[in-house]
Amino acid sequence: MATNALMSCTAAAAAVCPSVLSSSKSKFAGSVGFGANAATSRFTMSAEWMPGQPRPPYLDGSAPGDFGFDPLRLGEVPENLERYKESELIHCRWAMLAVPGILVPEALGLGNWVKAQEWAAVPGGQATYLGNPVPWGTLPTILVIEFVAIAFVEHQRSMEKDPEKKKYPGGAFDPLGYSKDP
């Protein structure tokens, strides 16, 4: 019943106000040059981050997901904008790596990601990895080891002069050849 009512409303609206893109020769369709009068068939649109506001000149739409959204003007300096792109790439990789790190142990029945950190709430609690106790398993020790290891790797990456090597430390890992696909 609701479908019939919707269809009848649509038909009534089409009778009163025909579509601009329809085949009818309305006054509006003829004046803007739709159909055979058009010089080209390519039509492009760009979404604005805020209607009525001009797009910042430094955001030209060349980057993926660039819709001109920068209300604090953080990307005005080109070096900063490149650093933000690099940081976004690294954070996306960490997020993608976290998904199998959560799902695989749980699918194999080796742990539950919700209960994985319960040992840290107990004073002097013993850390476990896939059900086995970790020899250096106190929270402060693990945090120090993690901090030193990540600081070393990030320092090595930040010292790289080539911006592409900064984004792909150790080379681009592309076993399926997706980067070569046009």
Image (cartoon, rainbow, N blue to C red):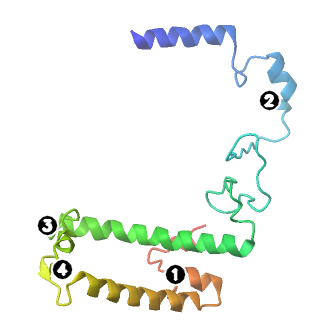
Q: Are marks 3 and 4 in contact (CB under 8 Å)?
A: no
For residue 130, the mark is: none
Q: Horizontally, is 72 left or right of 86 in the view? A: right
Residue that badge 2 annotates:
34
Q: What element carries label 1?
A: loop
- The residue that appears at 35% across and 69% down in the rendered structure is 98
Q: Nearer the viewer, mark 1 or mark 3?
A: 3
Q: Compared to 124, does 72 lie above or below?
A: above
Classify residue 118 by image quadrant.
bottom left
Residue that badge 4 annotates:
127
Label 1 – label 4 distance at C-alpha: 34 Å
Looking at the picture, how far across and down is residue 62, in whole percent? 70, 62
For residue 109, the mark is: 3
**Mark closer to the chain start, 1 or 3:** 3
Q: Nearer the viewer, residue 39 or 153?
A: 153
Classify residue 166 by image quadrant.
bottom right
Q: Nearer the viewer, mark 1 or mark 4?
A: 4
Q: Which of marks 2 and 4 is in front?
A: 4
Label 3 – label 2 distance at C-alpha: 61 Å
- The residue that appears at 76% across and 51% down in the rendered structure is 55
For residue 172, the mark is: 1
For badge 2, the amino acid type reads Phe
Q: Nearer the viewer, residue 45 or 71?
A: 71
Q: Do the residues labelled 3 and 2 touch (CB within 8 Å)?
A: no
For badge 3, the amino acid type reads Gly
Label 2 – label 4 distance at C-alpha: 68 Å
Q: Is mark 2 on a helix, strand or loop?
A: loop
